[in-house]
Amino acid sequence: MIEQAKRAFAICKKDIRIYYFKGPVVIYGVLLPLFLFLAFWIGRDMPPNFLIPGMLGMSMFFTASSVVPVIPPWETRMKTLERLVSAPISIASIILGDILASVVFGASLSIVPLLIGVAIGVRITNIEMLALGFLVGSFCFSSFAALLSSPPSDTPATIMMLSSLVKFPLVFISGVFIPLEKLQLWGRVLASISPLTYFVDLARYCMQGFSLYPPLLDLIILACFALGFFFASIKLHERSLPKRL
C-alpha cells in the first residue's frame, strides 16, 4: 500500500513536469473560465462577495478538470502508456497520480481569484472550512475529469471536447451565476446533480455567511461525489486500457 502510494506520487510529479503547460490545459483550464466569467461580470452591478465565490468555483472546476483529460490520450499517442503499465504499479495508483497532479494545479491556480477577492474587500469568515473545501472540491473535480478521460482515444482534443460538452451544462445549473435560493424548485433539483453546486454553496457560506445547505453537508456530498467518481474512473480505465495498448 505504501509502495503504491509512493508510485502514485511519482506519477503526480511526472504529470506536473510534463503536462502543466500543454496547450489544451492552458486554454481549457485558465483562459476559458476567465473569459466566461468576464462575459458574465462586465456591465453587471453585483457585489464582490457574490461574484468571487462563483468565480472561485468556476476556476477550480475548470482548472482541476483540465489536466487529467490530456494525460491518457497523450500517453496513448506517444506510446509511453505501454511502458507505464508494464511497471509494478496498479491502474488505481496511475489514476490517483494523475488526479493528484490535477488537484495541485486546480488548488494552486484557484488561489488567484481568492486573493483578488481579498484585495477588493471580500472577507473570509471561515478560512478553515474554505481550505477543507479546496482540498475536497479539487479532488472531486479531478476525479470527475478522470472519469471523462476513460474513452480509449489517442487524441487529446477529442477528450477535451467531450469534457467541455459535459462541464458547460454543469456550470450553468450550479448556482455560479444565479443564487441557489432564487431558483425555482425544479432548478434546485437540477442543481443538486452537479458537484460544483456544493462547492459554490460552501464558498458562499465562507464569504457571505449564509448558504442554502449546511456547510458540513456540502463537504460530505462533495466527498461522496469524489469517491464515486474515483472508483468509477478506475473501473472504466481498467476496461478501456487494453484498447489503448
Image: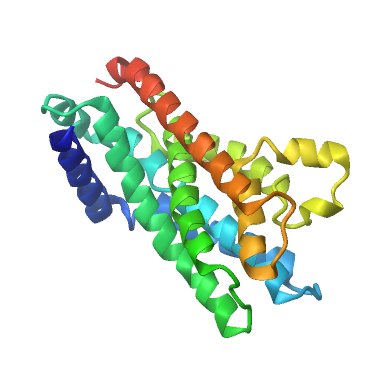
Q: Is 171 on the left-hand or right-hand side of 93?
A: right
Q: Is residue 6 above or below residue 62?
A: above
Q: How is the image coloured?
A: rainbow
Residue 162 visible? The answer is: yes
Q: In the figure, is residue 78 to the left or right of 108?
A: left
* Image position of 152 with respect to 157: above or below: above
- Viewer-closest of 173 and 150: 173
**Percent position (x, y) of residue 170?**
65, 42
In which quadrant is the C terminus drawn?
Answer: top left
Residue 207 found in image quarter:
bottom right
Q: Residue at x 39, y 47 (%)?
A: 67
Q: Position of residue 63 (x, y in %)?
A: 47, 54
Check the picture and name the quadrant holding the N terminus: top left
Estimate the x, y position of residue 118 in percent, counting from the top left: 56, 80
Where in the figure is residue 12, as x and y percent of width and height? Answer: 25, 47
Residue at 37% x, 49% y is 102
Is there any visible trace of residue 150 in the rendered image? Answer: no
**Residue at image point 75% right, 36% down:** 190
Give the quarter of the image for residue 5.
Answer: top left
Q: Residue furthest right?
A: 184
Residue drawn 88% across and 44% down?
184
**142 or 36, which lies in front?**
142
